[in-house]
Image (cartoon, helix red, strand yellow):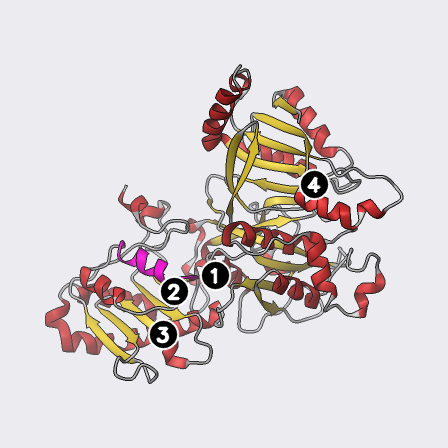
Amino acid sequence: MAITPILLDDDGWKQLTTLLENRQSNKIIVPNLVRHFEELGAVTVLVEDEYLDRDFTEAYASYYATLFKRHSKICSRVHLFSTDLSEILASESAKNLARKLEQEGQSSYLGFVVLRPIHEAPLAQAVLKTPDPPSEYECHPLVKAEFSVHVLGAELKIDAMPMTQQDQRIGACAQASIWSASRHFHVRHRGPWVSMVGITEAALSHESAGVSSTIPNGSEFLSLNGMVSSLRASGRKPLTYLGEGASTPFKWQGIRPKDVINRYLDSGIPVIVGLFDPKWGEGHAVVATGQVFNSSSLDKSKLPIRPTRAEFCSAYYVNDDQRGPNLRMAVGTGGSIGETDYSVEENIYFLIVPLPDKVFVPAEKAELFAWGLLETYQASWKNICRDFSNILKSSVELGNEFSAEIQSNDVIARTYLTYGWKYKHRLIRNNLTPETQAFARSTELPRYVWVTEFGTVDSLSHVDKKERRIFAHCVVDATAKNMGEDCRLFFHGPGLAIRRFHDPQNPSGDYKEENLIIPDDQAYYPKLRGTVDFQEYDE
């Protein structure tokens, strides 16, 4: 197996660009990839000239090997590094080379690209680190898994979200978006390994006659029914949201698409985004994977009722099989942050959320329950202070200030899905009082829970995220469909905590409820995705 190193000086960039452009008919995707590499600070490329890719091997066996025109199944794989590897590659010992490359890769490996030997759409995979946004913005690549590769005897790892290019022979943008989400679930959560071929086959079992207007069937588009069927075959339980209307922008009843995307991305779940623009003549699908924040841009006077953390979001990262990986899709129009010719507010007409099994409550309903409990807390706060002022102590002032913020619509909600055990793990390491931590620790929780955190516009607007604070949160049972009050298992607000639990004397009966009055309560830390403690706040 030959390995070709390329040092990315002027000639090296030309050589790499030529490699990427070979057989490529899409005029957008290569410039976007090259810009992506430049933003990541790529210095050296290692090219595996002969690489067997599992996905393309299956596509080859299913389709390309059946054609009269002969095709090869030998791909190439391009690895990118942010350092000069010349000295390491000059090592005389294979053992030393492997050790040094592995050590260097821990900090400098940027990811890889797989190129398949087919015309028009050779980009088989792009698994790349997310570049930083402009300096005034904050990057949150939320949906990612650890991919491991082996080259020259070294194991290299990268946290990323995979992207593929449609070829319109095996699949189109629908299959590409499903493949990206499914591969993430396979790597991160040990879900089934599914190929583009498998995705199309799963979709066709539930498709309408319309998909037969092209051959191979399903190669140029899938209906929403087919996409949902494919995701079920991948071990997920899809939840769909549909806009209304015949033209852009589409109308949404009772939800805001940016809120929906934000909640599920914050839960580590990729969101398949259906797009439409009249000038395209057809729909398109991409995968949302992360957030781009600008906390300083928030205008209190323009907040909607019950605002969410999405108000801080200026763009979402998407993987677009026609444009490239990790592109910024702006929320609104007219700004400079967007890197796509579509936006959340103008072009989204459906969303598909591939939920895990046993999640029966959607995020927006869980957040609605949390808001209800928060507003009940606010309405009761004066009475709580009257009855327990001798116990509350400094909690009175904190509760008064927070209640005023609730009443003035200055409280921001952030809802995310997590494991019950992980919620407890974080909570007992957070900055809550020991009494509150013990109270929550004794609360029985299911496998999946929705957590809604509540902070204020001011407490969450700090440029330094270590300075951000929340004042309340609610825990909702993610399995509790149509169970009313019984879905709310735990609540904390300044000076008060409430928990619901099974009655030991009647385990199958109604929950029992217990309240805790908390003296000298204080603000605490919002969750940092990807961590289970709050060491970054203490540094």
**Amino acid type, callout 3:** Arg
What are the residue bounds of the magenta stretch?
417-429
Position of 451 relative to 93 (above/below): below
Could you say which disc has been placed on residue 103 in the image? none
* 71 or 227: nearer the viewer: 71
Inspect the image, locate mark 2, and give the three-letter code of the amino acid beneath it.
Answer: Thr
Given residues 252 and 60, the one toward you in this image is 60
Q: Main secondary structure of the magenta part?
A: helix
Amino acid at the residue labelled 4: Leu
In the rendered image, residue 538, in percent from the top left (x then y), is placed at: 26, 44
Asked if disc 4 and disc 2 are in contact, CB closer than 8 Å, the reply is no
Q: Which residue is mark 2?
A: 452
Q: Earlier in the sequence, mark 3 or mark 2?
A: 2
The residue drawn where x is 67% and y is 20% is: 11
Three-letter code, disc 1: Arg
Q: Looking at the picture, does residue 350 appear above or below residue 88? A: below
Give the residue pinned by disc 1.
263
For discs 4 and 2, the disc positioned in front in the rendered view: 4
- At a point 28% along the width and 73% down the height, the residue shown is 499
Q: Report if residue 229 lies within the magenta region.
A: no
Q: Earlier in the sequence, mark 1 or mark 2?
A: 1
- Residue placed under numbered mark 3 in the picture: 488
Q: Which residue is mark 4?
A: 123
Give the number of the mark in front: 3 or 2: 3
Quadrant (top left/top right/bottom left/bottom right) for the C terminus:
top left
Q: Tell me where residue 44 sits by quadrant.
A: top right
Could you tell whether 217 is left or right of 380 in the image? right
